[in-house]
Amino acid sequence: MDRLDDTDERILAELSEHARATFAEIGQRVNLSAPAVKRRVDRMLDDGVIRRFTTVVDRNAVGWNTEAFVLVFCHGTIAPERLRAAWVDIPEVVSAATVTGTADAILHVLARDMRHLEEALERIRSSADIERSESIVVLSNLIERARP
Amino acid sequence: MDRLDDTDERILAELSEHARATFAEIGQRVNLSAPAVKRRVDRMLDDGVIRRFTTVVDRNAVGWNTEAFVLVFCHGTIAPERLRAAWVDIPEVVSAATVTGTADAILHVLARDMRHLEEALERIRSSADIERSESIVVLSNLIERARP
DNA sequence: GCTGAAAGCTGAATTAA
DNA sequence: TTAATTCAGCTTTCAGC
């Protein structure tokens, strides 16, 4: 897997903003023909640089109005893979990561409402050997970007 | 803006997984013709249900290996709009939200390395009237999903 | 949902560096 | 050899019905 050149970076930036843009459109912006763009995109897909193309959906419009970050504190040490296995089947958990500091993991949880969030937290806590958890509920989203 | 029906939800689920799928492919999965799918997608774009199409890029492959959540504690009360204005021009801040609890806001920050993170935190702290901040550095990502 | 014209995709052949 | 472009045939898009 070769390093990305400047053109690759520009193609990624384009795709991050407009994932459904045609190769010809992208080509125009980066000064390349459509087939050349496609070849680079295919290569980045093969190399795993591009993981997938997705859609940003307005959560409110779909009725998921409640959002929280959950700090999780475990009993003793637990292997990351065990934590992943415990939470991967809980759809409300959209992201999970092990972290430094006093907490062992941080979860990003989406729910339809507070009642739903409470119920999801219950499932999260009972799915692994958790000592305690601390929920930080989102009041309003200020910034949301695809990439730096 | 009408409520979404079950077919809309299935189209959104498809697009969340494969944003570059053709309308015909999506139509096959939801039992609809390609033009019918396009009409629904266009409507959801107009209604703001679909915000945009984007690309999930492997952060490591692009050389952004360091990630942190930052709890921010402010002096007194600051209007959310002020916080947004303070951070929106810092590209390393990929998301920011005001929150309940002892902290006033939580930021999701990406950086190339620890040195870069430290430097970004410096800019974040000096951009608003911040009392103190608490950084939670990500060790490993366990789960990352587009939606619940 | 169907149809047909316009636009886009993509492999092969070709050329430039 | 590596990477871009042009060309051709097939697929997709999308407006009108």
Image (spheres, coloured by chain):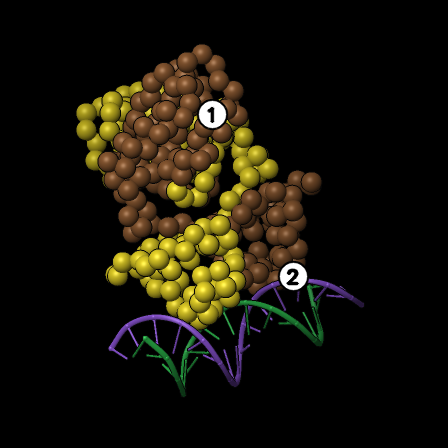
Chain colours: A yellow, B brown, C green, D purple
Q: Residue at x 65, y 47 (%)?
A: B46
Q: Position of residue B95 (x, y in %)?
A: 43, 34
When the figure is inspected, residue B109 is found, relative to residue B18, above or below; the finding is above
Q: What kind of element bears circle 1?
A: helix
Q: Nearest the camera: B26 or B99? A: B99
- Within 10 angstroms of label 2, few (less than 14), some, or many (20 or more) residues? few
Q: What kind of element bears circle 2?
A: helix
Chain to which mark 2 belongs: B
Q: Quadrant of the C terminus of chain A?
A: top left
Which label was assigned to residue B35? 2
Query: Is residue A10 something that shows in the picture?
Result: yes
Three-letter amino acid code at the position of disc 2: Pro
Chain to which mark 1 belongs: B
- Within 10 angstroms of label 1, few (less than 14), some, or many (20 or more) residues? many
Q: Are marks 1 and 2 on the same chain?
A: yes
**Residue designated by label 1:** B83
When the figure is inspected, residue A43 is found, relative to residue A74, above or below; the finding is below
